[in-house]
Image: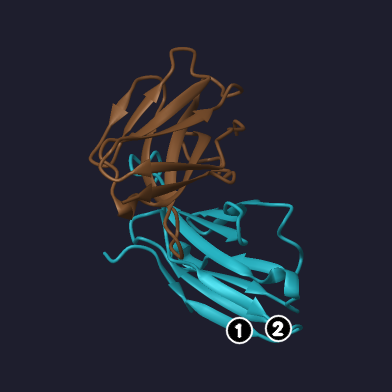
Amino acid sequence: DAKTTQPTSMDCAEGRAANLPCNHSTISGNEYVYWYRQIHSQGPQYIIHGLKNNETNEMASLIITEDRKSSTLILPHATLRDTAVYYCIGGTYSGNTPLVFGKGTRLSVIA
Amino acid sequence: DTGVSQNPRHKITKRGQNVTFRCDPISEHNRLYWYRQTLGQGPEFLTYFQNEAQLEKSRLLSDRFSAERPKGSFSTLEIQRTEQGDSAMYLCASSADRSQHGYTFGSGTRLTVV
């Protein structure tokens, strides 16, 4: 699995967009970028994934650079409930290789 | 479907005792994963099943750990002769092949070895 690098922590004001960066310079051509988040005392929750095109769903948007060496997860209007640890992971779509989690970014949304 | 269910939610055991955790995945998911998480760290992969076959085990999974998934439905994770270093949150996740929704995790079982 591709090794990813994320900032340890970030703050965001409530109602503003939260932009969480991730570097994955060693990602291979068939590896997707997955984002999960973990709210305190709960299991991780899937957010979004993408290969090379930008993706959007009801939770977030994922912007992947053209060279696929980095990506940004965007929460358009952060709320207090978005306070969590966010994990960026490189992995194959088939599911044959289990996802490897790093330490993630601790996002604190501030009122 | 109520998602991935793990039991018990909490377990306190004395060092040297055996413990067993259960995971009930989403019924149509054929893949099941076990992870362990300690404070301040991301989840660490332990093992995974495709249907009833255990396809991969991490080097973290010592011979005191064993996992089963009979009939490809629920799974159990047993730890024999527990040690204080086994204290952690044990997470179970399930997924379908080429899922558009990634893994679905349970709420975990928190193990405390005293």
Residue found at x 58% / y 33%: A4
Q: Is residue A54 above or below residue A107?
A: above
Q: Position of residue A55 (x, y in %)?
A: 31, 27
Q: Is residue B98 above or below residue B95?
A: above
Considering depth in this image, is A70 or B62 the residue closer to the camera? A70
Considering depth in this image, is A4 or B2 the residue closer to the camera? A4
Kindly check if marks 2 and 1 are in contact, taking CB atoms under 8 A apart as contact: yes
Which chain contains the residue that carries disc 1?
A: B
Which type of secondary structure does the marked residue at label 2 adopt?
A: loop
Considering depth in this image, is A47 or A19 the residue closer to the camera? A19
Q: Colour of chain A?
A: brown
Output the letter for the chain in cyan.
Answer: B
Q: Which residue appears farthest toward the top when viewing the image? A: A66
Residue found at x 50% / y 73%: B22
Left/right placement of residue A3 relative to residue B99 reads right
Which type of secondary structure does the marked residue at label 1 adopt?
A: strand
Q: Is residue B103 above or below residue A20?
A: below
Q: How many marks?
A: 2
Q: Earlier in the sequence, mark 2 or mark 1?
A: 1
Q: Which residue is mark 1?
A: B12
> What is the crowding at mark 1: few (fewer than 14 residues within 10 Å), some, or many (at least 20)?
few
Residue found at x 37% / y 24%: A63
The answer to which image quadrant residue B68 occupies is bottom right
Q: Which residue is mark 2?
A: B114
Q: Position of residue B104 (x, y in %)?
A: 39, 54
